[in-house]
Amino acid sequence: MSMFDKLFDEAKAAFDVAYAPYSNFNVGAAILTKDGAIVSGCNVENAAYPEGTCAEAGAIAAMIRQGHKRIAEVVVIGDAALCSPCGGCRQKIKEFADEDVKVHIANLDGLVTTLTVGELLPAGFELHGKK
Ligand code: THU
């Protein structure tokens, strides 16, 4: 099984248990960490809508909790033509990933497209940006 297939399966398992009763739009995300672990997350909505969290945020929280430091690869899955990570999630991913890290965007049929973190978030915010 390829690494993409493993990440896809983990992201799909997260997608299947997402809590999205308000949007009815499940999202799952799986991260391969630089030290070889796979962690996943799903979106978790809330009756107070802005309190909901994205799948990528859940996966990143799990990654940090489990002691992993850096992202090597990401798969995001949603039942859409292009379930592209939202702007906030692009910045969240950037915090832990180099610009050439691949983010695979998938739907229930499989891979849709692959973009790098740098392509998803050019000129992303850096607290101590180089002059
Ligand atoms: N969502 C994610 O989980 N990740 C994204 O990058 C885009 C949007 C979720 C948030 C909300 O629960 C649902 O998709 C509809 O916006």
Image: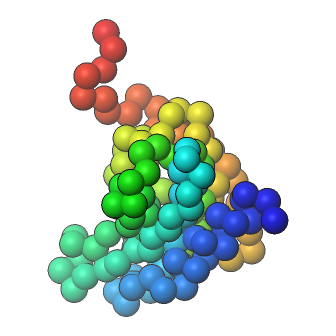
Q: Residue at x 65, y 64 (%)?
A: 7
Which percent across, then down, holds residue 58? 38, 66
Question: Residue 118: in sight, yes or no?
Answer: yes
Q: Nearer the viewer, residue 17 or 2?
A: 2
Q: Residue at x 45, y 70 (%)?
A: 41
Q: Residue at x 47, y 32 (%)?
A: 122
Number of numbered discs: 0
Q: Is residue 10 above or below residue 97?
A: below
Q: Is residue 89 left or right of residue 15?
A: left
Which percent across, then down, holds residue 52? 28, 73
Image quarter in which the C terminus is found: top left
- Ligand 1 is in which quadrant of the figure? bottom left
Q: In the picture, residue 12 is in which quadrant?
A: bottom right
Question: Residue 80: in sight, yes or no?
Answer: no
Q: Is residue 131 left or right of residue 66?
A: left
Render colour scheme: rainbow
Q: Is residue 36 left or right of residue 41?
A: right
Q: In the picture, residue 102 is in which quadrant?
A: top right
Q: Is residue 68 above or below residue 29?
A: above
Which percent across, then down, holds residue 104? 64, 54
Image quarter in which the N terminus is found: bottom right
Q: Is residue 57 above or below residue 11?
A: above
Residue furthest to the top in view is 131
Q: Is residue 80 left or right of residue 50?
A: right
Q: Is residue 46 above or below residue 77?
A: below
Residue furthest to the left in view is 48
Q: Residue at x 37, y 41 (%)?
A: 95
Residue furthest to the bottom in view is 21
Which percent across, then down, holds residue 60? 40, 57
